[in-house]
C-alpha cells in the first residue's frame, strides 16, 4: 500500500468517512507527514518513519502531545494510534512554519520564550522520562550494533559528559519539556500565536534544555540569547542560569549527534553530515565552558 493509499484509508476510518481531494507531502527528518484536503476540512497526517519504533515510545509521545493540546500550545489532536505512531492533527490556517532566520527576530524570540514558560510552568508530571545519559547509551548501542563508527575524541567527550552527570544533573528540577524544538517545529499563526508541534522526544527534563536548544537551532547570538533568557525568566539572568544554559548546549549537540548517527544507518551520508556538524559545534561549546 502506498503512503497516499494508507493516508486515505486512515482519514476515512478516523474522520467519519471524510474523502480526500488532495494530498501534499510536508517536511520532516524522520517521519512522513502529509497535508490532506478533505470534504470535512484540512488535516495533517503523520506516518512514522522507518526504524522509529526502535527509538521512540509512541505511548509517551501521546501523553505529551495531549498535554500540549490541553494548554493550547499545539494544534488540536484528532487521532493518535500509540501502537503504530499514526497521528491526525488540525491544520493551522494562515500559518507560517518557522526557519532559523525567522526565529532570530525579536518578536518571535519573545513568543517562543512565553510558550516555553507556559509548558514548563504547567505543573504536570507526565511521568515520561527524558534522561540524556540513558538515551545516549541507547544510541551508542544502536550505532555499535549496526556497524557505525564513533569520533576520534569520543572518549574525551564522554569523560566531560560524565562530569556533567555527577556535578550538574543531580541538582536539576525537571519539568515537562519538548526536547526537540528545532525551528521547523514552530508554527506561527498571525502576529501573536506560536504553536510548538511534534512531541516525539518530549518528557521530564531540565527546562534549560528547551531554551538552549532553540538558541542552537536558530543560531542565535549573545544579544538574542539575552532577550530569550530575560523574557523566559522575566528578569535579569543569574550567572548560574547562564552556565546551565551553556551546559545544555553541549548536552544537546552530544545527544543529537549520536541520534544523527543512528539515522545514518537508514538515511546515509546526509545524516552523517548532520551528526558531524553537531559534534563539531558541541566541541566548541565544551571548550568555552572548560575555559
Image: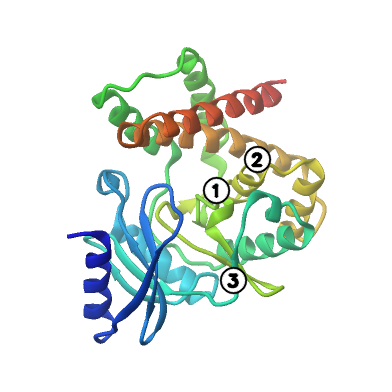
Badge 3 is on which residue?
A: 95
How packed mark 2 is, by other alpha carbons closer than 10 Å (few <14, some 14-19, many 20 or more), is some
Q: Are marks 1 and 3 in contact (CB under 8 Å)?
A: no
SS at badge 1: loop
Residue 76, horizontal then vertical, whole percent:
45, 77
* CA separation in Å, label 2 and label 3: 33 Å
Q: Quadrant of the N terminus?
A: bottom left
Q: Are marks 2 and 1 in contact (CB under 8 Å)?
A: yes
> Residue 199: x percent and y percent?
43, 58
Looking at the image, residue 35 lies above or below residue 208: below
Can you name the residue that lies furthest to the left here? 1
**What residue did someone put label 2 on?**
244
Of badges 2 and 3, nearer the viewer stands 3
For image coordinates 27% across by 21% down, the residue present is: 147
Identify which residue, 86 or 234, lies in the foreground. 86
Is residue 263 rendered to the left or right of residue 91? Answer: left
Using the image as rendered, state which of residue 56 and residue 160 is in the foreground: 56
Amino acid at each position: 500500500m502506498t503512503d497516499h493509499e494508507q493516508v486515505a484509508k486512515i482519514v476515512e476510518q478516523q474522520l467519519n468517512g471524510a474523502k480526500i481531494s488532495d494530498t501534499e507531502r510536508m517536511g520532516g527528518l524522520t517521519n512522513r507527514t502529509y497535508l490532506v484536503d478533505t470534504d470535512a476540512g484540512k488535516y495533517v497526517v503523520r506516518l512514522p518513519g522507518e526504524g522509529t519504533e526502535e527509538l521512540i515510545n509512541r505511548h509517551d509521545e501521546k501523553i505529551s502531545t495531549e498535554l500540549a493540546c490541553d494548554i493550547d500550545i499545539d494544534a488540536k489532536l484528532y487521532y493518535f494510534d500509540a501502537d503504530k505512531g499514526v497521528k491526525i492533527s488540525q491544520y493551522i490556517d494562515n500559518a507560517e512554519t518557522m526557519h532559523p532566520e525567522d526565529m532570530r527576530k525579536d518578536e518571535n524570540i519573545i513568543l517562543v520564550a512565553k510558550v516555553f514558560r507556559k509548558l514548563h510552568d504547567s505543573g504536570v508530571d507526565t511521568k515520561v522520562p527524558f534522561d540524556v545519559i540513558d538515551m545516549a547509551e541507547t544510541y551508542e548501542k544502536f550505532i555499535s550494533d549496526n556497524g557505525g563508527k564513533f569520533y576520534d575524541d569520543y572518549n574525551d567527550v564522554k569523560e566531560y559528559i560524565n562530569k556533567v552527570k555527577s556535578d550538574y544533573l543531580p541538582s536539576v528540577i525537571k519539568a515537562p519539556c519538548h526536547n526537540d524544538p528545532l525551528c521547523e517545529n514552530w508554527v506561527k499563526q498571525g502576529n501573536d500565536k506560536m504553536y510548538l508541534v511534534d512531541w516525539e522526544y518530549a518528557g521530564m527534563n531540565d527546562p534549560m534544555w528547551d531554551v538552549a536548544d532553540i538558541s542552537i537551532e536558530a543560531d542565535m547570538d549573545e544579544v538574542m540569547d539575552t532577550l530569550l533568557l530575560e523574557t523566559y525568566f522575566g528578569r535579569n539572568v543569574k550567572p548560574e542560569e547562564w552556565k546551565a544554559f551553556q551546559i545544555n548546549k553541549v548536552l544537546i549537540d552530544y545527544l543529537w549527534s549520536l541520534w544523527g548517527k543512528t539515522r545514518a544507518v537508514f538515511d546515509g551520508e546526509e545524516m552523517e553530515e548532520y551528526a558531524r556538524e553537531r559534534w563539531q559545534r558541541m566541541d566548541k561549546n565544551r571548550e568555552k565552558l572548560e575555559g
